[in-house]
Image: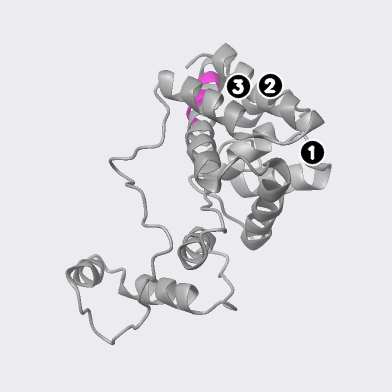
Amino acid sequence: MTSNNLREIIHSLRERLTTGRLGAGIVTSMTGMLAAAGYEYDVARFPALPSNHAWPTDLQDAPQSLAEALLWKMGKWEVYRSFVGYVADANSAPKTTDVVFYAFAKHLANSSRPIYDQHALRALWAIDSGMTHGQIGLCRSLLATRDGKWKASASGASTSEGYQLYLDRVERIRDESLTLDALDKLLMPLGQALKQHTADRADKERTTHITEFNRLAGLAE
């Protein structure tokens, strides 16, 4: 994918958001452009989740299924127990280190809550022309180091605030024709493309990842 391809996608989405909200038409078009360049939601790796499924949250002290046994073997039993608790308890709050798992648990409990991760937040930062200076600063602090390089994943003391920002902005930028699933299938691959492309460009131009990101999105340093 070229800089011009990415710039066109970002510009089209930002321009739409300066006058209104994103609808199904433009999101489908931009998702198609990303897919043509090799960035698309991997349905083989992440097949569709069943809708309105009643996920069981009864948890025993030891694994009771093959899936639970595999998580136990991988050393993820306590992570799994925490995850189940997030699904079961509507009033639960995340730790700073597991906001992405928390967000996914809340999506399973209520499909009107979006799936969230570093790539979705990065893409939102690029396209959302309505973000304030403070909101942009929050995205930067979660996704990049002080010297302008992308972090391996979103991290920092304000991870919960980043998730709340994502929830708020997603509802503000989409109209009634655009489903969360369709928006997710745009933001995830767009965020991945932005991370890879800006890192590659920074190495070539001897700049920083954030410098290249700001150039693509038309943002000030």
Residue 172, image x and y in percent?
Answer: 73, 46
Residue at horizontal 50 percent and vertical 28 percent from the top: 31
Q: Are marks 3 and 1 in contact (CB under 8 Å)?
A: no
Q: Residue 88, percent across and down?
A: 46, 78
Q: Quadrant of the C terminus?
A: top right
SS for callout 1: loop
Q: Which mark is residue 122?
A: none
Residue displayed at 63% across by 62% down: 160
Amino acid marked by disc 1? Gly
Quote the CA–CA distance across marks 1 and 2.
Answer: 13 Å
Could one spot residue 144 in this view of the protein?
A: no
Indicate whether 87 appears above or below 175: below
Give the residue number, with chain letter if any, for mark 2: 11
In the rendered image, residue 180 lying in the magenta stretch gets the answer no
Q: What is the spatial separation of the Cα atoms under label 2 and label 3, in whole angstroms?
A: 6 Å
Residue that carries the numbered disc 3 in the rendered image = 9
CB contact under 8 Å: marks 2 and 3: yes
When the figure is inspected, residue 48 is found, relative to residue 183, above or below; the finding is: below
Question: Position of 128 compared to 79: left or right?
Answer: right
Type of the residue with mark 2: His
Q: Residue at x 47, y 17 (%)?
A: 1
Horizontally, residue 45 falls left or right of residue 88, namely left
Which amino acid, by three-letter code, is at mark 3? Ile
Q: Earlier in the sequence, mark 3 or mark 1?
A: 3
Which residue corresponds to mark 1? 130
Q: Mark 2: few, some, or many residues within 10 Å (few <14, many ≥20)?
A: some
- Give the magenta part as a residue range: 196-201
What residue appears at the point 65 percent right and 54 percent down from the top-left corner?
A: 167
Residue in the foreground of this view, choosing between 95 and 201? 95
Separation of disc 3 and disc 1 at Cα? 17 Å
Q: Can residue 31 be seen by looking at this rendering?
A: yes
